């Protein structure tokens, strides 16, 4: 826990000193955080603190640290990175090599067409809401199936003869009244 608080102190210096102005407050906070984060290993806590430094503009609270530690535990990308991955994935979406199945399922729930045809300011909140719900389900123990890969049937086309081509051309001209 000392390493976590050391990282946070270096990164959020003024905010950290305002939140924990004396040794007694700091020790109470360390005990609370240690108790709250007891389900995580020290390595996961440090990784959560490093994620906080990358993602949070302000000093995280205990609730946010729980989320940050859990994100790393499940291998889930941060919501903004997941959104970018969902928007940039080629079609067919199911064939993309997803960083986590949750990204695919959140994109599908938000609707691929909606994500592709709306600005980030309106599409991201919709995606983030779906992604958050899916992440909560994962943290509750649910497992998500991997996307089913779309396999196109291989059809070998036999070239048409000249007579068949002429017949098809005549049919098209008749349909188009040319």
Image (cartoon, rainbow, N blue to C red):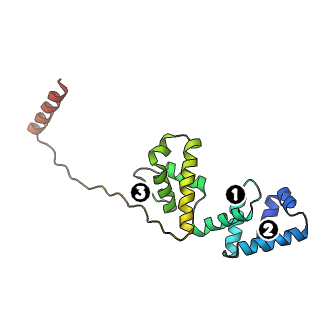
Query: Which labelled disc corresponds to residue 125?
Result: none
Q: Residue 119 location in percent, x, y? A: 55, 40
Query: Which labelled disc corresponds to residue 54?
Result: 1
**To which quarter of the image does residue 62 belong?**
bottom right
Q: Residues within 10 Å of mark 3 (few under 14, many from 20)?
A: some
Q: Is residue 58 above or below residue 72?
A: above
Mark 2 or mark 3, which has the lower sequence index? 2
Give yes or no for contact between labels 2 and 3 (Cβ–Cβ under 8 Å): no
Regarding mark 3 in the picture, which secondary structure is present there?
A: helix
Q: Which residue is rendered at x = 48% and y = 62% of the image?
A: 101
- For this rendering, which residue is in front, 21 or 174? 21
**View extreme (top): residue:** 178
Q: State the CA–CA distance, disc 1 to disc 3.
A: 30 Å
Q: Residues within 10 Å of mark 2 (few under 14, many from 20)?
A: some
Give yes or no for contact between labels 1 and 3 (Cβ–Cβ under 8 Å): no
Regarding mark 2 in the picture, which secondary structure is present there?
A: helix
Say which residue label 3 marks.
94
Q: Quadrant of the C terminus?
A: top left
Mark 2 or mark 1, which has the lower sequence index? 2
Q: Residue 78 location in percent, x, y? A: 61, 58
**View extreme (left): residue:** 163
Looking at the rendered structure, the number of numbered marks drawn on it comes to: 3
Residue 40 left/right relative to 101:
right
Q: Quadrant of the N terminus?
A: bottom right
Q: State the CA–CA distance, disc 2 to disc 3.
A: 41 Å
Query: Which labelled disc corresponds to residue 5?
Result: 2
């Amino acid at each position: 826990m000392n390493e976590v608080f050391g990282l946070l102190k270096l990164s959020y210096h003024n905010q950290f000193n305002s939140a924990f102005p004396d040794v007694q407050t700091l020790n109470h906070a360390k005990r609370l955080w240690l108790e709250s984060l007891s389900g995580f290993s020290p390595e996961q806590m440090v990784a959560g603190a490093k994620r906080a430094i990358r993602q949070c503009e302000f000093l995280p609270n205990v609730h946010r640290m729980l989320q940050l530690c859990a994100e790393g535990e499940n291998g889930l990308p941060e919501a903004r990175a997941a959104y970018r991955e969902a928007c940039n994935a080629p079609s067919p979406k199911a064939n993309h090599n997803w960083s986590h199945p949750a990204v695919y399922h959140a994109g599908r729930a938000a609707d691929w067409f909606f994500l592709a045809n709306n600005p980030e300011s309106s599409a991201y909140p919709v995606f983030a809401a779906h992604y958050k719900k899916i992440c909560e389900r994962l943290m509750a123990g649910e497992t998500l199936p991997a996307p089913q890969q779309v396999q196109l049937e291989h059809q070998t086309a036999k070239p048409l003869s000249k007579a068949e081509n002429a017949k098809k051309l005549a049919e098209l001209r008749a349909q188009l009244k040319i």
